[in-house]
Image (cartoon, rainbow, N blue to C red):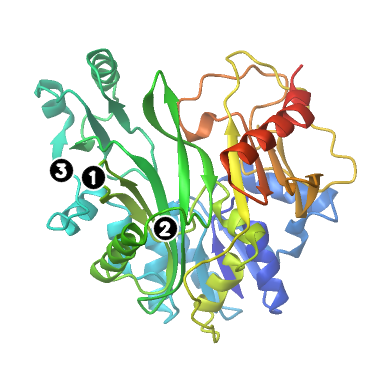
Amino acid sequence: MLILGGFSEITEEYVRCIRKRGLKAIIVDSRKNKLDQLYRYKRCNPHHFINLVDEIICMEEYSMESFFLVVNNILEHDQIVGIIPIDERLVVETAILAGYLGLPNGGLEAAVISRNKEKQRQLIQNTPWKVRSQKVTLEELMTTILPDSGVIKPINKYGSMDVMIWSDESQKKSVLDLLKVQKSKEQLYLLEERIVGQEYSIESWVRDGRVLYSSITKKQTLKSEGIEFPVEIGHQVHYHELSEETIQQINEMNHFVITMSKIQSAIVHLEFKIDESGTPKVMEWCVRNPGDRIMDLYLYAGEVNPYDLLLSIVLKEQVKEYLPSHSSKQVFQKYYVLEEDTILKSKMSHHDLPVHWPANPDSQGLVRNREGVLIDKGLGLTVYELGILVPPNQKALPVRDSLTRHLYIVYSINSSSSQDMEMSEKILNETIINQLYE
């Protein structure tokens, strides 16, 4: 059997790939409300993918001890052939337990580094991809004269949680006001220079330290009055519109990170910006699935099944080494930021389409069609997913972080020209998005 540590919207494809191999699938999580939701689906909806899961186990908390107890109990009656961390909070625990069982994993040192932004900065401090950074306490932040622009990020929190960016005096004052109300006085931070430039990521499927497949994702981040915030609102996989020299630098940077942080067998999600001089600058990296449906974007693009490829790595199956990505299919995810106080219609009418409610029981859910629904033949505009993240009959709140976004759509078109992009967004607004408002 194979253990999935945690639960999210990407769990379904892993479960299907596991069952395709004739293996048992087990979900382990500590969020009782979310697991109770899964039990309800299992009882009430025979077509829900959760019925393919052999067992759902609720551990007491996210901790090494709780995870070890679950694994130990399973070993008393079954064999474990692989462990995949779905939730970032189980990345280190997975590396420890998989290593103990002799199973492929990202590597303990790599897992620890991926969860600690300070260690990442230390690793690249003598490279051209570094970002100037210093470790500070909350007290030091409050007594330091901050630069005109900069970034403050907690050392040990994942993703963009509690990251603060400023580029003028009024924003700097807002940052200082936020720091004054921080509850954890022991929290350590990184004070960093603010890199101006387009943000990207490179996803790599790695076996024994060697990249089997990789591709670049272009990102769009939230802006207010021209100022960037660490909230991603758009993604485009298989992005190729960069110079050969830049792509070579990105690949060198990626290889350095994988080698120096001793990543063994895992997905690597490395985020970076390209600054005004054309140099890639590392933001951060992790040894887990990328968020924001990026895995599904790769799936719909069709060049590779990202879930199946990771399972092949974890299960030591024979896998060909892919050439660098040259996929021509343009697949996008776009988040829509609604006006404050907008009310979305109550629970979406899904008719015969499968509805998969997300990990947050209070959200509305998403409609998904793996083959896609053709909206416009001329553009090749095809929609795969529509996700509504605002609770029914509640007002849309301002977007402050990735957990307060409103809704998104996943689609593909034949071309990524600016004219086709504008036309496709106009059609999506008219045919789908505007129909969701009260």
In this picture, is 97 found above or below 86? Answer: below
Can I make out residue 388 in this image?
Answer: no
Q: Are marks 2 and 3 in contact (CB under 8 Å)?
A: no
Taking the view exactly as shown, the residue that stands out farthest to the right is 352
Q: Please tell me how crowded label 2 is: few (under 14), some (14-19), or many (20+) other residues with Cα within 10 Å.
A: many
What residue is at 85 percent from the left and 55 percent from the top?
Answer: 46
The quarter of the picture where the C terminus appears is: top right
CA gap, disc 2 and disc 3? 22 Å
In this orientation, which residue lies closer to the viewer: 174 or 254?
A: 254
* Residue 175: mark: none
Residue 238's spot in the image, x, y percent?
A: 52, 57
Q: Quadrant of residue 158?
A: top left
State the SS at label 1: loop
**Residue linked to disc 1:** 277
Q: Position of residue 388 (x, y in %)?
A: 68, 33
Quarter placement of the N terminus: bottom right
| Tag 3: amino acid | Arg
Q: Which residue is mark 3?
A: 132
Q: Are marks 1 and 2 in contact (CB under 8 Å)?
A: no
| Of the image marks 2 and 3, the number of the one nearer the N terminus | 3
Task: Quickly name the residue at label 2.
Answer: 202
Q: Nearer the viewer, residue 248 or 224?
A: 248
The three-letter amino acid code for the residue at tag 1 is Ser
User: Does residue 66 show up?
Assistant: yes
38 versus 317 height, above or below = above
Three-letter code for the amino acid on which mark 2 is drawn: Ile
Dot 2 falls on a residue whose secondary structure is strand
